[in-house]
Image (cartoon, rainbow, N blue to C red):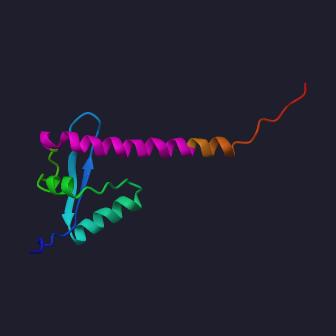
Amino acid sequence: MNAPYRQPVAIALEFDGNNAPRVTAKGRGEVAAKILETAREHDVPVEENMILAEALSAVELDDQIPEPLYQAVAQVIAFVLSLRDTAQDRAHQDLVRQAPAPQETTG
């Protein structure tokens, strides 16, 4: 017997660093595709985790995530922050490489 087909789901979270993350967008099918498209257009990292997305889809918009999901969401946030830090390190290295060498002056 085949498992029932479930449309893809996408969830957007906002985390201010002080409170539990909030669900700021969620949807299935075309709405999920639009959430993902918007995220990619704005260079927002996307983590694919179907089980977590399904669990978060039960959270109402603008509600904080429930405590039982804290650890799983914390792992995603840590992953996203590590990506951001890596990208910032690369950008800094590129700037250092592109900076002109100091000119020697004789005095």
- Quadrant where the image shows the N terminus: bottom left
Q: Residue at x 49, y 46 (%)?
A: 87
Q: Residue at x 12, y 71 (%)?
A: 3
Is residue 102 in view from this perspective?
yes
Q: Position of residue 7 (x, y in %)?
A: 18, 70
**Is residue 21 visible in this depiction of the protein?**
no
Residue 12: image location, x then y, percent? 26, 54
Q: Assess whether residue 87 is covered by the magenta stretch.
A: yes
Look at 22% across and 36% down and name the residue there. 19
Q: Quadrant of residue 21?
A: top left
Q: Which residue corresponds to the image point at 35% horizontal and 44% vertical from the top-left?
A: 79
Instruction: Give the number of marks.
Output: 0
Reply yes or no: does residue 41 show up in magenta: no
Q: Main secondary structure of the magenta part?
A: helix
Q: Is residue 13 left or right of residue 95?
A: left
Front-lying residue, 56 or 105: 56
User: Image height check: is 94 above or below 31?
Assistant: above
Quadrant occupied by the C terminus: top right
Answer with left or right where residue 57 lies relative to residue 81. Answer: left
Q: Quadrant of residue 15?
A: top left
Q: Residue furthest right?
A: 107
Residue occupying the far top of the picture: 107
Q: Residue furthest left?
A: 1
**Foreground of the two, 42 or 2:** 2
**Extreme-bottom residue of the structure:** 1
Residue 84 locus on image (x, y percent): 43, 45
Percent across and percent down for residue 13 are 25, 50
Q: What is the span of residues highlighted in magenta in the rendered image?
A: 66-91
